[in-house]
Image: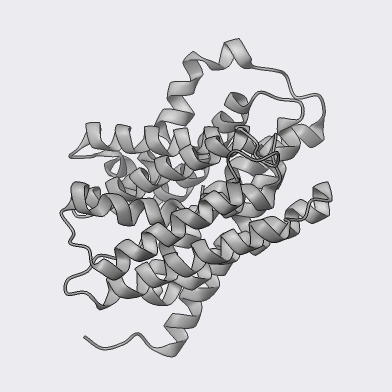
Amino acid sequence: MSSPAPSRLMIGILFMLAAGTLFPIMGGFGKLLGQDYNSLQISWARAFGHIVFLSALFLPRFGLAVLRTRRPGLQVFRSAMLFTSNLCYFFAISLIPLGKAAAISLAAPLIVALLAGPMLGEKTTRGRVIALLAGFLGVLIVIRPGTALFHWASVFVLISATAYGIYQILTRRIAGIDSPETSALYSACVGGFGMLLVLPFVWQMPASLLDVGLFIAVGMLGALGHYCVAHAFGYAPANILSPFQYFQLLGSVFVGWVLFSEFPDSATWIGAAIIVGSGIYIGWSGSRAPRARPAAAAGN
């Protein structure tokens, strides 16, 4: 199989870097809103904006056929995992710094590697097991349970990463059954429509046009980010793109510093470096294994 042309590789990398820029900005806006609004309302705005954006993009091109799925139950469960991930993340970043939350969320590819065996039947190696253990050690260094620096909201980021990892596994399972456009639309259905049953109990009218704009931006940026990730993997293989997905950490640190004067401490950087190294090794080793599947991309 021939390698992609350098120009296509560069386009894929640029799309991944764009996603790594959009997701942190979305997180920053979500954290701003979290100071005054319920995380359920923010998560609904994220999901509903996703649906509106992709509907406007796909419906004129594919028509209502894009809504047909051969596995509705799997699509709904997959959507529930993405909503759980977003909800836990938005809740957590209202209490802890963005950079720290982003570092913990990098565990999502590790979760994918851990669950790929029991859920997808993928074989693992001793090297990947060691990398997994090292990665989760990095997570513990960032969270620091049992110390005065531990914050219980960090656990919600870990839950978010776990839910997102399961979402990625389910995305792999549905890939050969439904089209990418169908899966992209269904990924937000639980948050966008299911939350309408709960929204009246937590709804708070936006206090200003700025807040309205932030709610809209959270949804649009999230949808654009996922759209960029999907395009990135259409231009370049996972083993090339894997290191660039961690650009999101730097973006989150920058946004946290600009908007909230937050900056990660040395232990967070050390833990993040271990997580990133483990994730890159797992992605690289997976690309060298026979008939290996692509590594999951990070994101919210």
Q: Give the quadrant of residue 210.
A: top right
Q: Residue at x 48, y 55 (%)?
A: 137
Name the outermost residue toward the top.
201
User: How many marks on residues?
Assistant: 0
Q: Give the answer, above or below, for where 193 lies relative to 95.
A: above
Q: Residue at x 49, y 72 (%)?
A: 243
Q: Give the answer, above or below, for where 159 lies relative to 44.
A: below
Q: Give the answer, above or below, for where 92 lies relative to 285.
A: above
Residue 79 x/y as whole percent: 37, 36
Residue 156 x/y as whole percent: 54, 35
Q: Give the quadrant of residue 44.
A: top right
Quadrant for the N terminus in the image: bottom left
Residue 227 x/y as whole percent: 47, 56
Q: Residue at x 50, y 42 (%)?
A: 158
Q: Nearer the viewer, residue 139 or 56?
A: 139
Q: Give the quadrant of residue 94.
A: top right
Residue 127 shows in this picture = yes
Q: Nearer the viewer, residue 184 or 65?
A: 184
Instruction: Please indicate whether residue 279 sits to the left or right of residue 221 in the image.
Output: left
Instruction: Please indicate whether residue 300 sits to the left or right of residue 230 in the image.
Output: right
Q: Residue at x 61, y 60 (%)?
A: 249
Q: Nearer the viewer, residue 78 or 287?
A: 287
